Image (cartoon, helix red, strand yellow):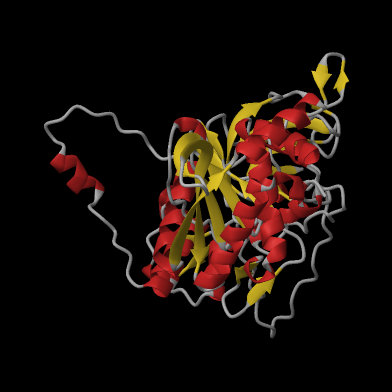
Amino acid sequence: MDVLMPQLGETVTEGKISKWFKSAGDVIKPGDNLFEIETDKVSMEVPAISAGVLTEIRVAIGEIALVGAVVAVIADAGGATANAPAAAPATVPAAPAPAKSAPAPVAAAPAAATFQPTRPTTSMDPYREVRTPERNFGPARQGGVSVTPLARRLAGENSIDLSRIKGSGPHGRIVASDVESAIGQSRGGAMASGPSLSEVRSIYSGTDYTEIPLDGMRKTIATRLTQSKQTVPHFYLTADVAIDQLLTVRKEANAAAPVKDGVPAYRISVNDFIIKALALALQRVPAANAVWAEDRILRFRHSDIGVAVALEDGLLTPVIRHADTKSLGALSTEMRDLASRARDKKLKPAEYQGGVSAVSNLGMYGVREFAAIINPPQSTILAVGEARRAPVEAPDGTVKFQSQMSLTLSCDHRVVDGAVGAEVLKAIKGYLENPVTMLV
């Protein structure tokens, strides 16, 4: 049986083998972990789905393979692979001699390879997402250019001429990110490509530096956020929020948390209040609880909120589903779990895809205020600055100090107009300045 590189998400086209748990010659049982793969976002252990002997490893540790590529082969106990063609019979009856008047039959040319029908998939098959009608599930060729199936589908859906695209994959193969860049060009005009690698090297020819090749995550960040800034019409709204009451409520809530074996059941952070406030604000202003979908707008019933988590080599944005319906304690517990698994690259695609808006908090780094880039197809993102003590004028004309922080809401103007965005930010401010309203 051929062991294939599985697909971990709709836009994932390749994966890197980071570890082999088995070696060639090892006996394999169903459920045994075979290898671990890394994509631009996650790591995942891939189990065996049948018994046999691992006879061949085709992709070594550190190498990258396309989704659907054969990375190993498992043979049955008898030594034959499960999908190997049946052996030819020992003897073949001789064909009758043709009549003299009949033309001699022409022997068919031998096939270069024999391809057997793929095994049926089941609901428990971890490879079911990569089944396509293409031979060996590998890339097709378009005008002499090698193209991955996802890249070809994206090109077809967006009327992109593949012959004009220079592939960035192995051996010049066109991958999905190449097509996404071309889509951005076609929608937002010609992209400013910037200086080439050789031009940059020549500029710094007299300077010591180290070249760091881009990994999958950094390539994805570069492609998606460049596309976002060039194709999404951003505008920004900023407000200062008083948080003295919030800090008091947070302290009281954490003090009242149930304790088991000396460990509190939850520990609510300021960020948890912000996530909840954004989710409730989008419920109050449903026109903003929506995303752009080419020729229409999708408006949602619940508020799914992404939260940016910094990693060593980039960032991930796990999504809290139905954040508007969850208590602060539940939000806190779920967010800690998602953040921990995001840093370990153990999230499933369903846990970081989608969402209608997101929170990006740089306050812990001492950043007072910033504007975040929207992650399409989301229509807004809330940037959170640090909490600080600031002088404000009291109603009686005196000056007092209060704790406050700056919030900047980035909006996609195709979905959210200025007044609608202002209503959302006003609602967020109201919830945070009166945090008890989030508890009822």
Residue at horizontal 45 percent and vertical 55 percent from the top: 225
Q: Position of residue 183 (x, y in %)?
A: 45, 69
140 in relation to 439, above or below: below
Say how many tags the image has.
0
Q: Position of residue 136 (x, y in %)?
A: 65, 55
Could you say which quadrant of the image residue 269 lies in?
Answer: top right
Residue at horizontal 47 percent and vertical 64 percent from the top: 179
Query: Horizontally, is 267 left or right of 192 in the view?
Result: right
Query: Horizontally, is 71 left or right of 126 in the view?
Result: left
Residue at horizontal 70 percent and vertical 48 percent from the top: 276
Q: Hey, which residue is sitting farthest front in the picture?
A: 396
Nearer to the camera, 150 or 411: 411
Query: Horizontally, is 269 left or right of 164 in the view?
Result: right
| Screen quadrant of the N terminus | top right
Could you say which quadrant of the image residue 148 lies in?
Answer: bottom right
Residue 144 appears anywhere in the view: no
Nearer to the camera, 334 or 73: 334
Q: Hey, which residue is sitting farthest top in the picture?
A: 262
Query: Horizontally, is 20 left or right of 392 in the view?
Result: right
Residue at horizontal 18 percent and vertical 48 percent from the top: 199
429 in relation to 256, above or below: below
Q: Hey, which residue is sitting farthest bottom in the picture?
A: 101
117 in relation to 27, above or below: below
Residue 421 appears anywhere in the view: yes
254 in relation to 137, above or below: above
